[in-house]
Image (cartoon, rainbow, N blue to C red):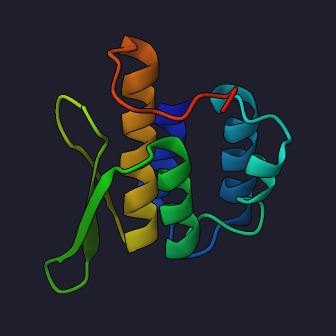
Amino acid sequence: MSAVLTHRLEMAGACDLALDADLMHWLAEDVGMGQTDRWLRHSCRLVGCMTGALRLVDDLFPNAAIAFQMKGRGAAFSALVIPVGAPAPFAGLAPCAANAVLAASLRAFAHASARQDGFEMMRAAG
């Protein structure tokens, strides 16, 4: 599911309520936040919102490094999320900087979940 969400984020503009709803479902089910207070923090908006994107990165990967920049005359933004202890940075590219950060975060989470290679990641029990 995270691969599909990542692709949708990289194609989405600054506002996509259906994508927001799907991201909330992903957080509740796949990430394991359920419908807790931690989950509710993200319920206002994620897609196109840098505050929401940075809050999500902080929840998923405490102390992660984040970098983003505009690529070629504002056509797209690239973002890197580097979780503590990760083997490599994770990249996202989208028309909106917040979506690029979200896409990179989803890639990092999918990698950490699949490999369980021990880099610092939020756990559902936390």
Q: Which residue in the rendered view is the most extreme toward the bottom?
A: 73
Q: Quadrant of residue 25?
A: top right
Against 1, residue 98 (above or below) is below
Identify the residue at image location x=37%, y=36%. 108
Identify the residue at image location x=81%, y=55%. 40
Q: Which residue in the rendered view is the most extreme toward the right?
A: 35
Identify the residue at image location x=74%, y=60%. 41
* Residue 56 position within the rendered picture, expressed as x and y whole percent measured from the top left: 55, 54
Against 53, residue 104 (above or below) is above
Against 89, residue 29 (above or below) is above
Which is nearer the eye, 24 or 14?
24
* Residue 72 position within the rendered picture, expressed as x and y whole percent measured from the top left: 13, 79
In this rendering, position of residue 102 left or right of residue 123? left
Q: Image quadrant for the C terminus?
A: top right
Q: Quadrant of residue 55?
A: bottom right
Identify the residue at image location x=51%, y=42%. 60
| Residue 49 visible in the current orientation | no
Q: Quadrant of residue 110?
A: top left
Q: How many marks?
A: 0
| Residue 21 visible in the current orientation | yes
In this rendering, position of residue 43 left or right of residue 119? right
Which is nearer the eye, 126 or 73?
126
* Residue 62 position within the rendered picture, expressed as x and y whole percent measured from the top left: 44, 47
* Residue 111 position within the rendered picture, expressed as x and y whole percent measured from the top left: 36, 25
Q: Image quadrant for the N terminus?
A: top right
